[in-house]
Amino acid sequence: MAELNPFRIAQQQLDEAAEALGLDSATHEALRWPMREMIVTLTVRMDDGSVKIFRGYRVQYNDARGPTKGGIRFHPQETLDTVRALAAWMTWKTAVMDLPLGGGKGGVTCNPKEMSEAELERLSRAYIRQVGRILGPEIDVPAPDVNTTPQVMAWMMDEFSALRGYNVPGVITGKPLPLGGSLGRPDATARGGMYALREAAKVLDIPLEGATAAIQGFGNVGQHAGILAQELFHMKILAVADEFGGIYNPHGIDAKALAEHVRETGSVTRFPGTDSITNQELLEMEADVLFPAAIEGVITAANADKIKARVVCELANGPTTPEADRILHDRGIFVLPDILANAGGVTVSYFEQVQNAYNFYWTLDEIHQRLNQKMTKAFADFYAAYQRHKVHPRLAAYMVAVSRVAEAMKLRGWV
Ligand code: NAD
């Protein structure tokens, strides 16, 4: 089970890159641990008058290349180690995208599905009252992630601004548009993934037009991925799954209609005209592209030899364990690594920061164009390293990212 601790996985991934790069031991050791972490206890008044205690985290992993950046998750299984792993991955993600940012992450152990809107607002504000002292546009900038929405970002931005006594829109990204949000943020992660997939398909010589797909997770990222895969490439979505189960239709599933069904019923299950399947069956399905878009640790040594997709486009963070990486690589399955494939979200978040700083806003076309440029360039840098070093794709992406962070640390005189 040690394999499944996400922070151990993140450290193993770094270790492999450090060895391949011949990184000196001081830089390597410094990069194995977060630069700063904060654990807080939040007291929140519930609607029935009782007070509930929650545990919250903010981890600033490394800021050698710029202010730390990374989402906040509200999840019952959130732990310090999941947040550390995600903060490490943000560091590599901003570096592989060549953004002038470091990596961080936050989380609260809670079940937002059992909380009212008013309780969520009080929780969000309590989190900022505790963690706000280490946040700021030039320090650390959170964003939405699992179970946190633009509304949550709005409450957090408002609480931070109230503490400072003036408006600070740049403290957080993923805000609603009237509060300084960016156009193009809702589908940015999925759209970036599609641009990266398009570049991968070119070099792998896989025609995307009409290719088949399976999607695990149909929340923010999975829904947009399904809709864009159909809009941009006319892909045929054979199967979709969420935490409640999966659905299958060999003739294809309409992503827009399924998103509507999820809005009405809360799950993809029982979508008319489909058969039920399990999450395992979905992962092992015969499809050209598998999109993990749910949670970490779903492709492991136990199922990697049964995966049949030609490309795994990792929209989720950390869906594949290191052992599974090697198995997939040996079997000729191309993994488009998470730090690149799902970096569209942080890239448009970065655009949002830039727009907030200038107090001047771009059109949707400008956002799409700049995202396209950034993803295309990042894929080219990654693919050049993949060809040069002849290693598995995640290692190639890590080698690009880690060497960029290490160079910044060296230039600053830290190591
Ligand atoms: P979300 O909460 O909107 O959706 C999560 C989806 O995963 C839901 O459909 C849920 O039912 C499903 N799910 C949860 N547990 C599952 C399980 N055990 N088995 C199968 N399905 C399960 O979250 P999201 O924002 O879409 O994020 C999904 C993934 O993408 C996460 O790994 C997140 O870290 C990553 N990610 C998100 C963004 C972003 O911009 N939102 C950016 C980069 C990476």
Image (cartoon, rainbow, N blue to C red):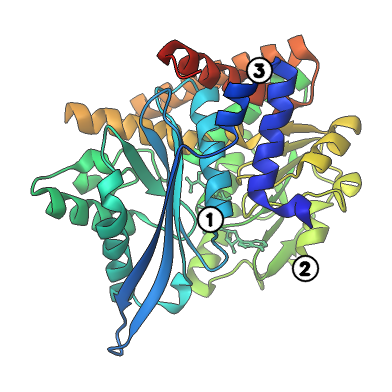
The local secondary structure at tag 3 comes to loop
The answer to whether the beta carbon of the residue marked 1 is less than 8 Å from any atom of ligand 1 is no
Q: Amino acid at mark 3?
A: Leu
Spatial CA distance of label 2 from label 1 is 38 Å
Is residue 337 shown left or right of residue 70? right
The local secondary structure at tag 1 comes to helix
Residue 335: image location, x then y, percent: 74, 33
Asked if the residue at tag 2 contacts the one at tag 3, i.e. Cβ–Cβ closer than 8 Å, the answer is no
Q: Earlier in the sequence, mark 1 or mark 3?
A: 3
What mark, if any, has residue 80 been given in the picture? Answer: 1
Is residue 2 shown left or right of residue 296? right
Q: Nearer the viewer, residue 67 or 35?
A: 35
Q: Which residue is mark 3?
A: 23
Q: Which residue is mark 2?
A: 275
Q: Earlier in the sequence, mark 3 or mark 2?
A: 3
Query: Is the residue marked by circle 2 packed among few (<14), some (14-19), or many (20+) residues within 10 Å?
Result: some
Is residue 323 shown left or right of residue 89? right
Residue located 39% across and 22% down the image: 100
Closest to the camera, between mark 2 and mark 1, is 1
Image quarter in which the N terminus is found: bottom right
